[in-house]
Image (cartoon, helix red, strand yellow):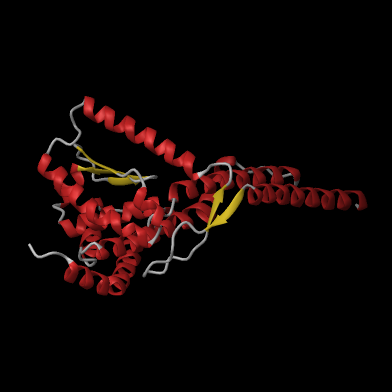
């Protein structure tokens, strides 16, 4: 009995040591950074970023991926096929981009690119370093207004400003370490954990909540960018209503990387009031047409 009890204590101590070592390795491979200034909407969260994957590396990867995407679309003749639509989207981008200095002055000098891709997909994105893509499906299927399109583009630009891709890569690395630690620790204790189950648990507890946090940040920063550029921030609410109607059913919020439509609508309504004075000031400063 004494021998068995001693063995159990040793196993528990070994399991704790394994988890501690893995946790320490994860922490040592990261640094806490402030990627952006707070802005009017008050984004103050510090982000844990991998010291192994630099911002320059992410920018280079994004530039290469965007170049390939643009080249493939050009070959398929699905790149910028509508000059009027391209001028519309680039015009909105040209008003949004100068506003990024509020969050990070260096971003004004990024090598920004804006292109439209002919596709039924309802999508848009801004890669690291300012590589923007808008799909015609987003514009056509939602019958999107300029104010709504500014909300979408502002949201995507915000992801780039906050370096959410780099942050997500860091979280994936850390989550992988903790998943491995759970499996190894359980094995030391004499239990068997399915790696898939451990990975799912790690995603639910660790990764998905932070992904939702990134989406809220992008919503709020996007609102401010749009408002400062002279686009009505309230359009973000009609935009997400259209998106919700288009998408139909959705997974439970705890399984989703996006906030629930209800919480998103409430947050957008609150933040639109915060940035409303910026919008009104921008309207006064816009040249008369």
* Quarter of the rendering occupied by the C terminus: bottom left
Residue 93 point in image, percent of width and height: 24, 51
Residue 197 point in image, percent of width and height: 56, 45
Residue sitting farthest toward the left: 289
How many circles with numbers are drawn on the protein?
0
- In the image, 60 versus 143, the foreground residue is 60
Residue placed at 58% from the left, 46% from the top? 51
Residue 35 point in image, percent of width and height: 47, 56
- In the image, 42 versus 205, the foreground residue is 42
Residue 244 appears anywhere in the view: no
> Is 77 placed above or below 82 here?
above
Residue placed at 75% from the left, 47% from the top? 189
Residue placed at 43% from the left, 54% from the top? 162
Residue placed at 50% from the left, 59% from the top? 34
Residue sitting farthest toward the right: 2
Residue 1 point in image, percent of width and height: 90, 52
Position of 234 with respect to 252 (left or right) is left
> Is 178 placed above or below 73 here?
below
Among the 4 quarters of the image, the one containing residue 37: bottom left
Among the 4 quarters of the image, the one containing residue 199: top right
Residue 137 appears anywhere in the view: yes
- In the image, 160 versus 23, the foreground residue is 160
Residue sitting farthest toward the top: 75
Position of 183 with respect to 99 (left or right) is right
């Amino acid at each position: 009995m004494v021998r068995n009890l001693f063995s159990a204590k040793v196993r528990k101590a070994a399991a704790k040591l394994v988890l501690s070592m893995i946790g320490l390795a994860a922490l040592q491979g990261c640094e806490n950074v402030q990627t952006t200034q707070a802005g009017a909407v008050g984004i103050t969260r510090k982000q844990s970023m991998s010291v192994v994957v630099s911002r320059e590396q992410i920018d280079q990867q994004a530039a290469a991926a965007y170049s390939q995407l643009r080249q493939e679309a050009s070959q398929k003749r699905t790149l910028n096929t509508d000059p009027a639509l391209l001028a519309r989207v680039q015009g909105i981008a040209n008003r949004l981009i100068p506003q990024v200095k509020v969050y990070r002055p260096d971003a004004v000098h990024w090598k920004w690119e804006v292109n439209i891709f002919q596709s039924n997909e309802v999508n848009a994105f801004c890669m690291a370093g300012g590589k923007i893509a808008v799909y015609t499906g987003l514009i056509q299927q939602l019958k999107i207004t300029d104010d709504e399109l500014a909300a979408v583009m502002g949201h995507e630009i915000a992801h780039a400003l906050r370096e959410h891709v780099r942050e997500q890569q860091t979280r994936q690395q850390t989550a992988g370490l903790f998943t491995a630690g759970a499996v190894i620790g359980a094995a030391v204790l004499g239990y068997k954990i399915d790696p898939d189950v451990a990975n799912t648990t790690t995603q639910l507890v660790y990764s998905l909540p932070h992904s939702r946090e990134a989406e809220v940040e992008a919503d709020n920063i996007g609102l401010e960018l749009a408002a400062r550029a002279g686009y009505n921030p309230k359009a973000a609410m009609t935009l997400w209503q259209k998106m919700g109607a288009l998408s139909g059913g959705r997974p439970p919020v705890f399984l989703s990387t996006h906030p629930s439509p209800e919480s998103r609508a409430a947050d957008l309504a609150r933040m639109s009031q915060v940035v409303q004075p910026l919008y009104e000031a921008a309207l006064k400063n816009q040249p008369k047409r």
